[in-house]
Image (tube, rainbow, N blue to C red):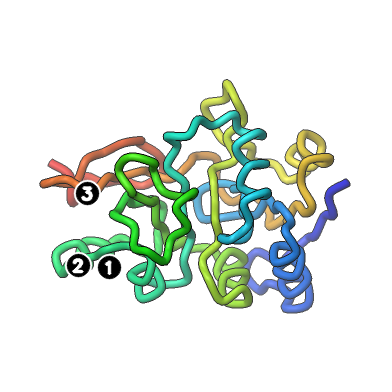
Amino acid sequence: MAQFFQIHPENPQARLIKQAVEIIRAGGLVAYPTDCAYALGCHIGDKMALDRIRAIRQLDKHHNFTLVCRDLSELATYARVDNQTFRLLKGQMPGPFTFILEATSEVPKRLMHPKKKTIGMRVPDNPIALALLEELGEPLMTSSLLMPGDTVPLTDPYDIRQTLEHQLELVIDGGFCGMEATTVVDLTGDAPELVRQGCGIADDFID
């Protein structure tokens, strides 16, 4: 049975953030708010929790997982970023984008795309998500909370608890935070390529 924390969307309670991070470090799977919609998160090194996300979302081995980071400097530890890419990222982060980049050796192989060795990277603009990341001290392995067959993520924390209460350790109620997944942009080619249109507008950097 999932625990249910009501955390203030603008001033997250430090005690609850600390408890949430303890659950994540212990192998727990958490539903948490971002600046786009609710997402599933687990510890970057936890293979069992990752397998549970795959099962919940019915994902195949070619799915690009995402590491959610505190800031651009942390992102650059886990993805290869040249100067041009850094400038592009700096203009869009924090924000509603996931960027697919070439992974560094800091990323566990099971998180990378098996052939391309890429990883999704993102810096959210949400106080609860950023507080979790600050307390955790490392990226959070994340996947959009899109259930099989659905086209939009689950948006109501009470619905999330009812749907997944036996498959998660924690649901964080941070209020309404959006109902679209991130916009996904692949930066591994010669030019940025739109992979999925979500709540981020990419017109400024995609022709």
Question: Which residue corresponds to the image point at 73% horizontal and 75% vertical from the top-left?
Answer: 18
Disc 2 crowd, CA 10 A, few/some/many (<14, 14-19, 20+): few
Secondary structure beneath label 1 = helix
Q: Amino acid at mark 1?
A: Lys
> On the rendered structure, is 95 left or right of 24?
left
Quarter of the C terminus within the rendering: top left
Q: Amino acid at mark 2?
A: Arg
Residue 150: name its quadrant: top right
Residue 116: name its quadrant: top left
N-terminal label among 2 and 3: 2
**Do callouts 1 and 2 mark residues in contact (Cβ within 8 Å)?**
yes
Place of residue 98 in the rendered image (x, y in percent of width and height, measured from the top left): 38, 50
Place of residue 40 in the rendered image (x, y in percent of width and height, measured from the top left): 62, 48
In the rendered image of this protein, does residue 148 appear above or below residue 190? above
**Disc number for residue 188:** 3
CA separation in Å, label 1 and label 2: 5 Å
Residue ID for mark 2: 87
